[in-house]
Image (cartoon, rainbow, N blue to C red):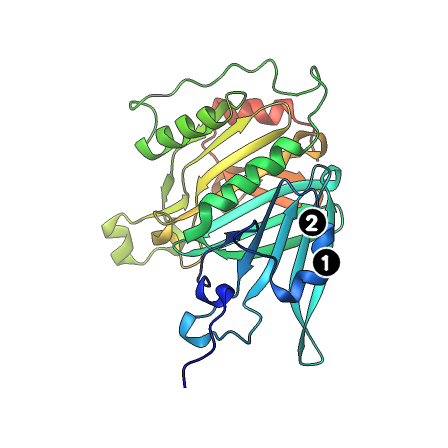
Amino acid sequence: MKKNSTFEFDSFGPWILLINEDHAVPPLFQPLEKKLTGSLMAFKIPRDIERREANPAMNLYDAVMGILEDKILIFKRVLRDGRDGVQEIEIPLSEISGLRNNTYLLSGILTIYTAGKSIEIPYNTVSDEIIQEALGLIRKLMPPMADNSSPFLSLAALPYSRKTMELEFINICNRVQKEDPQMQLISYQPSIEYKVPRQFRSSLLMRLGLKEKVQSSYVIFHDKRELSIVQRTFFPDGPNTDAYAHLQCYLPLASLSAKYCEEKKMPLPRLILETDMMNEEFYFDPGNEGIRNILESIPAS
């Protein structure tokens, strides 16, 4: 017998849908719908299931997210006593201490950090355009630092060309600065490879002169609000995945600290960037002047 069809079921798939006249708040979350009034953007995130496993009687969406002028509302589907319930999360924009977006092929995880917790929102990257729009809106609404308080005002923008940067990162820089002309490139770190230390090499590896990649390429931008990092990253299956995996980090300058770290076992120093609940670490070439400038400009943690 053919299952009864509903508009929500007919439109269900791996994609995120904007909540508007065409796509309503899912039934599970409708008791909270009034709280979304005044949202500048609201969308619903589907369950991670195959369409053939879905049916019109199911709650088909895992979360609803609304972005208002002063806060973010997230309604999550949770199991309570074997039944679907709703967890309500409210995040004042003034309390956000960082944003992180990991993507690997069709898997994405948006993480919002505050002083007391981190909230993860898994999604399918077929909807990356909506996530990017949401990230841009949240960052735009977050309060900027005072005009003269950014630690990077004295740093000159880093020039780039095909001679000094990979094509993929030239395209990233062009896109970032087209979307937000205030964003200024201050550092670029190409991928770093080094020879496996002698004590860890077999005689065969020594003959091969084997090298191991320890850091994928990344770029760092800043404006009056934040430090922004875009990186190819090893996620989650190992170093050969960095052509398909990317990381975006946004760290508000108001709560940002940095430190320099060296390890005896590793011949490369690390840049460690921290805000409340957020810690990002990047290896860098000791001669990278842009990262040296960052370390000199940001208070040490």
Residue 85 is situated, as x and y percent measured from the top left of the image, at 69, 70
Residue at mark 2: 36
Name the one closer to the observer, 171 or 220. 171
Q: Disc 1 to disc 2, how far (Cα)?
A: 8 Å
* Above or below, comparing residue 186 to residue 104 in the picture: above
In the shown orientation, is residue 14 left or right of residue 82?
left
Q: Residue at x 70, y 65 (%)?
A: 86
- Residue assigned mark 1: 32
In the figure, 118 relative to 152: above or below? below
Under mark 1, the amino acid is Leu
Quarter of the image with the C terminus is: top right
Give residue 166's quadrant in the image. Answer: top left
Quarter-of-image position of residue 276: top right
Residue found 72% across the figure and 62% down from its top: 31
Residue sitting at 65 percent across and 39 percent down?
274
From the image, which quarter does the N terminus lie in? bottom left
Helix, strand or loop under label 2: helix
Please tell me whether mark 1 sits on a helix, a strand or a loop. Answer: helix
